[in-house]
Image (cartoon, rainbow, N blue to C red):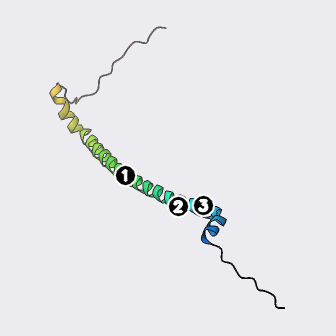
Amino acid sequence: MAAKRKRATVPSVPALILDNLGYLSFLGVLALLYIGNAHYAEYNVRRIQELESDIKEKRWLYMSLESENMYNGLRSEVVDQVRPAGLRLHRGKPKKIYAPPRAK
C-alpha cells in the first residue's frame, strides 16, 4: 500500500501574527526610535541655526562697540570731550605730590 502523503498546511494570517508577536513588537519599537531620532536631529539642526544667527548678531554688536571704544579713546577725542568741563591738556611736566611717611 502506498504511503499517504501529508498535505502541507498553510497557516492562517492571524496565527502567523500571533506566532511572531514578539518580533513584530520589536520592529515597531525600532520604528518609533527611528522616527523619534529623526525629529530630535531636526530639532537640533534648527536650534544650531538659531544659535549661529545669535552669535553673528552678538559678534557684530561687539565689533561695533569695540570700534566705537577705540575711536572714543583717541587723545583728540578725549580732549574734545573734557573741554566743556573746563579741563585742558597739560603741556608741562607732571607735578609730584609727596606725603610724609605714616608713624606706626
For the view shown, which residue lies furthest in the left direction?
A: 84
Say what amino acid the circle numbered 1 marks.
Glu
Q: Front-most of 55 and 7?
A: 7
Q: Are marks 1 and 3 in contact (CB under 8 Å)?
A: no
Judged from the image, the secondary structure of the residue bearing numbered disc 3 is: helix
The kind of residue tagged 3 is: Ser
Nearer to us in this view, 92 or 80: 80
| Mark drawn on residue 50 | 1
Q: Position of residue 90 (x, y in %)?
A: 22, 29
Mark sitting on residue 34: 2
Badge 1 crowding class, 10 Å Cα cut-off, few under 14, some 14 to 19, many 20 or more, is few
Query: Residue extending furthest front?
Result: 1
Q: Mark 2 belongs to which amino acid? A: Tyr
In primary-sequence order, the first of circles 1 and 3 is 3
Q: Residue drawn 44% across and 10% down?
A: 102
Within 10 angstroms of label 3, few (less than 14), some, or many (20 or more) residues? few
Nearer to me, 7 or 75:
7
Q: Nearer the viewer, mark 3 or mark 2?
A: 3
Corner quadrant of residue 73: top left
Name of the residue lying farthest toward the right: 1
User: Along the horizontal axis of the image, is 3 left or right of 88?
Assistant: right
